Image (tube, helix red, strand yellow):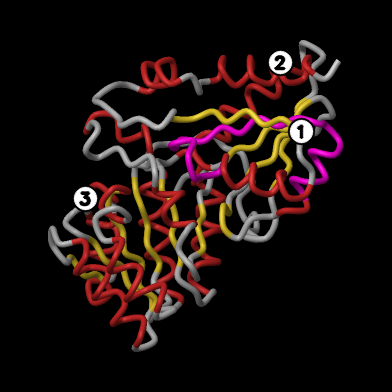
Amino acid sequence: MGSYHEMEMRVVYAQTLSELIERNSNVFCLEADLGKADASIPVVSKSHPRNFINCGVQEANMIGVGAGLAKEGKIPFCATFTAFATRRCYDQITISVAYANNNVKIVGTSPGITQGPNGGTHMCFQDLAIMRAMPNMHVYSPADANELRAVMFYMAQSRQPTYMQLVRLKMPKLFEDGCLFDPNQAVRLHDGRDVTLVATGFMTSFALDVARQLEKEKITVDLLHYPSVKPFDVKTLVDSAQKTGAAVVVENQNIVGGLGSAVCEVLGEHHPVRVKRLGIPDQFGEVADQDYLFNKHGFGPEHIAQACRELARSKS
C-alpha cells in the first residue's frame, strides 16, 4: 500500500472505512448506488459484505436505514453525491438524524465545483450552509488524505450526527500520516501579521500556495484551515483578526451561509474587521472545468492573492 496522499481521496475513504469495520464490526457502509464512484465497491463490499448495504437510488431511504441502524447501536456511514446527501433528503436528516440525535455519519462526495462534469444539477454550493444550520449537526471538510483519515477515525468513535464533505480527487499533502483531528481547533498552516486567510476542504491547498507566494512579496498571511465548520473555533479566528486587522475567506461554496458567513458572524460579535468572502457569488453551477469556474466566479489562486493584497494594503 502506498502513502495515502498519493491516492485519490475516494480510495482513502473506502480503505479507511474498511479499516474501521475491521476494528469495530458495528461500523457500516451505506451507499445509494454510487459505491463504484466512492470506491466502496469493491474495497468495502468484497472485504466486508455483511457491513455493506447498497440502498439503491433512494437517498432519503438510505438516511432512514442509517437512522435505524444507529438506533440499534451501529455506526453507519451514508455516502452519495453532495447534492443528494443534503438537499435531496434534508427533511429525513432533520427528523430521523438531527432531531432524534442519531449517530449517523453523512458523507457528501464531490462538493462544489469538483462535480464539474455533471453540471448545475449535481453541483451543490449550499451544503455547508444548510448543514451548519441544523441543530445537533457537526460539519467537517478535510483538506487532504491524511486529515480525511483522522476525521473518519474521530467520526467513528464520536457519538453525534455528522456531515462530512469528501473531495474524491487526489489532493496535495498538507498533513503527516497519523495527524489528529480536533473539531474545536483550527489549524494554522502559515503564520503572518498582514492579513488573515481562512479556508476549508478543497480550497485549503490553494490558500497555502497563495500564502507562500505572497511571502515573496513581503505580505505575510495568517492562514487558518478549518476542518470543522461546526463546531467553529472562535478563539483562533479572533486572535488572528486582532493581530492582522483584516480577513479573506475562500470556500468551494456559495458565499451565503457557509464558512464566510461563519467568519463574519464570529468577527461581527467579537472583533469587527473588514472581511472579503470568496466563493460562488450566489449562483448555480454549470458543466465546466475547475479553471473556468475559478475565473468566472473569482475565487481561484490569483483572486485569493489579489484579495489578500488589497486588504493588507488597505490598512496602511
| Residue 191 x %, y % | 80, 33
Please state the extent of the stretch shown in magenta in the rendering: 236-259
Q: Mark 2 or mark 3: which comes first in sequence? A: 3
The front one of 224 and 40 is 224
Give the residue at x 42% y 41%: 7
Q: Which is in the foreground here, disc 3 or disc 1? A: 1
Image height of 43 relative to 295, above or below: below
Q: Secondary structure at mark 3?
A: helix
Asked if residue 25 shows in the view, the reply is no
Indicate the secondary structure of the residue bearing disc 1. strand
Residue 254 colored in magenta in the image: yes
Amino acid type, mark 3: Lys
Taking the view exactly as shown, the residue that stands out farthest to the bottom is 72
Q: Which residue corresponds to mark 3? A: 36
The picture quadrant where one finds residue 26 is: bottom left
Residue type beneath disc 1: Asp
- Residue at numbered disc 2: 309
Is there a contact, CB below 8 Å, between mark 3 and mark 1?
A: no
